[in-house]
Structures are given as structure tokens and as C-alpha cells.
């Protein structure tokens, strides 16, 4: 992967500064990268990646970079396949972006219980900026260790697309973090009619698209965003981050995660390094550069 000195220094700092976390915290054994959005104003959160054409495909997280959270065998790609793109924007936008595509043989969105947000197909993700970890599982830990869920809401009793992962218990006071101007999310399916049924199955399967942008907080107060500490995202920053893709169909739930077994056991997230505009190569920039060389070659 392409990197520069700043990124290498950030990774070295991350290992030294977050000594409590497992040395091997990433399912891919390396780490993950979030790319700076060139033009946040051009990003529309609608469940389409048409406005992600700038994203360097080198940094797409593919199925082979996930593992089973339950240490079960990974599904066959014909049954389930995942790709994910992580991005961030500098101030004044200062947001975290994510686009996840899941190809699944079955779409299961039958649950009506928002108090059990992991039921059915969804994504579970979170931030832990200070690398606090889940220190004993106390409710106060959720101020640092901040998980959320994004799921299709066709059959839920609430239309909250993005919700705290413990919506009905310890995190009910933190639902304000899931709404604009602090967050927005969208879920789309292909074919679109798949989302009209509690359970959709076909020979060709279904694609589910999850897209979001969200303000990141290093400390989250139950009194809301105004009383919390918002993080300022910047190139070279190390972000402890969780992404789980939940597959709800079948006799048991399957979770594909980007964190290692050691991180799961210790209650820590995977590690993501933020790359600036000069740290990755946009496909658009490659095309423009190539076109420029062709024009020079022909003397135009």
C-alpha cells in the first residue's frame, strides 16, 4: 500500500500510545485506512456510491479483510460478500464517512423491535478515539466506546435508520448523536423491491448499501452533543474504529468484523489511519494525469 512518512509515524505512535490495546488488533493483520474526502459538498448520503468515484480502490476493505466475530468459517462469496470504504473530511465539515456494500443471498429485515438493533441484517460500527476500550462493560464506558447501528427501517416500530447500539437501555439518551447536523445515514437495496418484504430471497441474491456521515466525539455526554467533546479529524490521525456486518438470516446471527480475535476478547476496536489528499491516488486524478501525458505525446 502507498504511504508516506507521516502515516508511518502515526502508526508507530499508535502502537506506543495505545499500549493497553492488543498488538494485533486488526482482522487483516495490517490495519485500515480512511481517505480524505476531496469535496464534502459533493457527497450525498443516499445509499449510492456514485459520488465516491474519487476513492482509491487500493483502500477498499474487501471480504478477505474481515473475520467472523464468532470465529466461525466465513461464508461463501456467493452467499455473502462485503466491501467497505472509509473516509473523513477536514474542518469545517469534520465528518466521518462510510459506504458499505453487502451482497447477500437473503435480505432479512423482519424485526419490529428497535430495542434489539442487532436483529436481522444491519451494520454495527463505532468510534473509540481515546482507545478507552470496554473497561468492564459499564454504561459509562459508552461515553468513550461508542457503538451505533444502521439498518433498514421498513418494519421497525421507529424510523430511526441510525441508532445507538443499546437504544432501549443505557444509550437511549444518546440518540441525538444520530441526527443531523451530527449524523445522517441511508440504506438502499438492489433490487429496490427487496426492502418491501420482511425476508427476500432470490437466485441472484440482493445488494444492500449502507452510507453515512457522522461527527466523531472523543467523549460523548448523555446531555447531548453540545456537552460532549468533538474530535477534529486530521491527516495522520489514528482512529480506533469498529465495523461489524451483521447477517441475521439462518438459525444464528453471523457477524463479519474488521477487528482481530484478540481485540474482540480485550474489548478494543480495530485501527484506522486517516490519509490526507496527498497520501492516496484518486482514480480521477490518474485519468487526468494519463490524459495529459497522451496530449503531450501528440503535441496538442
Image (spheres, helix red, strand yellow):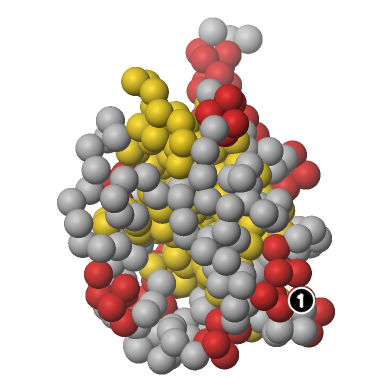
| Residue that carries the numbered disc 1 in the rendered image | 225
The image quadrant that residue 91 belongs to is bottom right
The residue under the point 51% across, 44% down is: 109
Percent coordinates x, y for residue 126 in the rendering: 52, 67
- Nearest the eye: 204 or 229: 204
Q: Is residue 65 left or right of residue 13?
A: left
Helix, strand or loop under label 1: helix
Q: Is residue 242 left or right of residue 184?
A: left
The image quadrant that residue 267 belongs to is bottom left
The residue under the point 18% across, 51% down is: 73
How many residues crowd mark 1 within 10 Å: few (<14), some (14–19), many (20+)?
Answer: some
Percent coordinates x, y for residue 233 in the rendering: 63, 67
Could you tell me if residue 82 is visible in this image? yes
The residue under the point 28% across, 30% down is: 78
Percent coordinates x, y for residue 283 in the rendering: 52, 32
The correct choice, above or below, for 281 with respect to 151 in the image is: above
**Number of dots carrying numbers:** 1
Could you tell me if residue 57 is visible in this image? no
- Nearest the eye: 55 or 161: 161
The residue under the point 72% across, 40% down is: 44
- Nearest the eye: 160 or 8: 160
The image quadrant that residue 271 belongs to is bottom left
Percent coordinates x, y for residue 112 in the rendering: 58, 53
The correct choice, above or below, for 177 with respect to 131 in the image is: above
The correct choice, above or below, for 116 with respect to 20 in the image is: above
Quadrant for the C terminus in the image: top right
Amino acid at each position: 500500500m502507498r504511504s508516506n512518512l507521516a502515516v508511518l509515524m502515526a502508526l508507530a505512535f499508535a502502537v506506543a500510545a495505545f499500549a493497553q490495546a492488543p498488538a494485533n488488533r486488526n482482522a487483516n493483520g495490517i490495519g485500515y485506512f480512511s481517505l480524505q474526502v476531496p469535496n464534502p459538498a459533493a457527497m450525498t448520503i443516499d445509499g449510492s456510491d456514485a459520488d465516491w468515484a474519487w476513492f482509491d480502490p487500493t483502500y477498499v476493505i474487501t471480504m478477505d479483510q474481515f473475520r467472523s466475530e464468532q470465529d466461525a468459517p466465513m461464508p461463501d462469496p456467493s452467499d455473502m460478500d462485503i466491501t467497505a470504504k472509509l473516509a473523513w473530511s477536514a474542518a469545517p465539515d469534520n465528518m466521518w464517512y462510510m459506504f458499505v456494500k453487502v451482497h447477500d443471498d437473503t435480505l432479512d429485515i423482519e424485526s419490529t423491535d428497535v430495542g434489539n438493533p442487532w436483529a436481522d441484517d444491519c451494520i454495527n460500527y463505532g468510534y473509540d478515539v481515546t482507545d478507552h476500550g470496554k473497561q468492564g462493560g459499564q454504561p459509562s464506558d459508552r461515553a468513550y466506546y461508542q457503538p451505533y447501528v444502521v439498518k433498514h427501517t421498513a418494519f421497525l416500530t421507529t424510523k430511526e435508520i441510525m441508532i445507538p447500539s443499546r437504544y432501549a437501555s443505557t444509550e437511549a439518551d444518546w440518540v441525538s448523536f444520530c441526527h443531523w447536523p451530527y449524523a445522517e445515514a441511508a440504506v438502499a437495496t438492489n433490487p429496490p423491491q427487496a426492502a418491501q418484504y420482511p425476508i427476500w430471497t432470490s437466485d441472484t441474491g440482493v445488494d444492500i448499501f449502507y452510507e453515512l456521515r457522522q461527527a466523531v466525539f472523543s467523549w460523548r455526554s448523555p446531555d447531548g452533543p453540545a456537552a460532549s467533546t468533538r474530535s477534529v479529524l486530521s491527516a495522520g490521525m489514528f482512529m480506533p474504529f469498529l465495523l461489524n456486518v451483521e447477517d441475521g438470516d439462518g438459525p444464528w446471527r453471523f457477524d463479519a468484523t474488521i477487528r482481530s480475535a484478540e481485540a474482540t476478547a480485550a474489548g478494543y476496536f480495530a485501527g484506522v489511519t486517516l490519509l490526507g489528499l496527498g497520501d492516496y491516488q484518486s482514480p480521477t486524478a490518474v485519468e487526468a494525469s494519463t490524459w495529459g501525458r497522451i496530449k503531450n505525446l501528440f503535441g496538442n
